[in-house]
Amino acid sequence: MMGRASTSHYCISAQSSIYFNEANTYAFAGNRFLMSLPEPRNPLTHHDVRSALQEIIEGKNVKRIQHDLRSDGRDFTEEFIEELTRRGYRPATVAMVDVKPGERVPAFYVDGGVAHFGWVFWEQFTSWKIRKLWGSVKKNVRGDWDIQIPSGKPATIYANPLLKIEMDIDHPPEF
């Protein structure tokens, strides 16, 4: 959620814990500082928001799980989708994503101002029964994907097939 953090620094998402100053984006890992945080300027600039959204999409300094794109009455969903497009993510349904068994494609599902990160892949139940789906990296209490979108559902996801990687089809929950 974008707003003032208790340290008087701006944060775009309580779950992403990305903070800004004049020149850089700074991050926390839990309660541990990764970098010192100088006083920010006020208010956030377009560049600050884009930098934070880029951090969420790339997952380099912040874990790609689930990020609230709303704060203080402002919704950054449109900016997030624009940044996804700039980074090679394209709107598609699960059925439209080109992925073979043993591969996975990174994708975001954006719903109600929240960006959920996950993968499009084939889940194998037996040697002859598999299904294509998008599964969030956030797990439920049973250890299954918290959100699942099967290939027959018309929900829009934002996938980047250029970032396709191999996976162990026998153990998809382990990614």
Image (tube, helix red, strand yellow):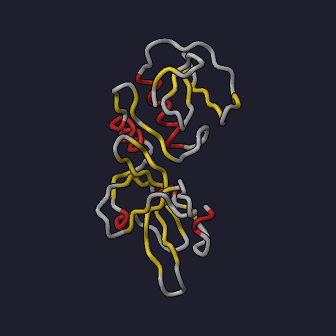
Q: Nearer the viewer, residue 131 or 46?
A: 131
- From the viewer's perspective, is residue 88 above or below residue 127? above
Q: Nearer the viewer, residue 145 or 91?
A: 145
Taking the image as shown, residue 4 lies to the left or right of residue 33, namely left
* Image coords of residue 10 (percent x, y): 51, 21
Residue depicted at 38% across the width and 47% down the height: 110
Taking the image as shown, residue 158 lies to the left or right of residue 36, namely left
- From the viewer's perspective, is residue 47 above or below residue 30? above
Q: Nearer the viewer, residue 166 or 64?
A: 64
Q: Seen from this angle, which residue lies furthest bottom?
A: 128
Residue depicted at 49% across the width and 43% down the height: 57
User: Number of marks in the image?
Assistant: 0
Residue depicted at 55% across the width and 19% down the height: 9
Considering the image in quadrants, where does the C terminus appear? bottom right
Q: Nearer the viewer, residue 53 or 115?
A: 115
- From the viewer's perspective, is residue 49 above or below residue 100? above
Q: Seen from this angle, which residue lies furthest left?
A: 154
* Image coords of residue 101 (percent x, y): 51, 74
Q: Quadrant of residue 171?
A: bottom right
* Image coords of residue 153 (percent x, y): 31, 65
Taking the image as shown, residue 50 lies to the left or right of residue 167, namely left
* Image coords of residue 139 (percent x, y): 54, 57
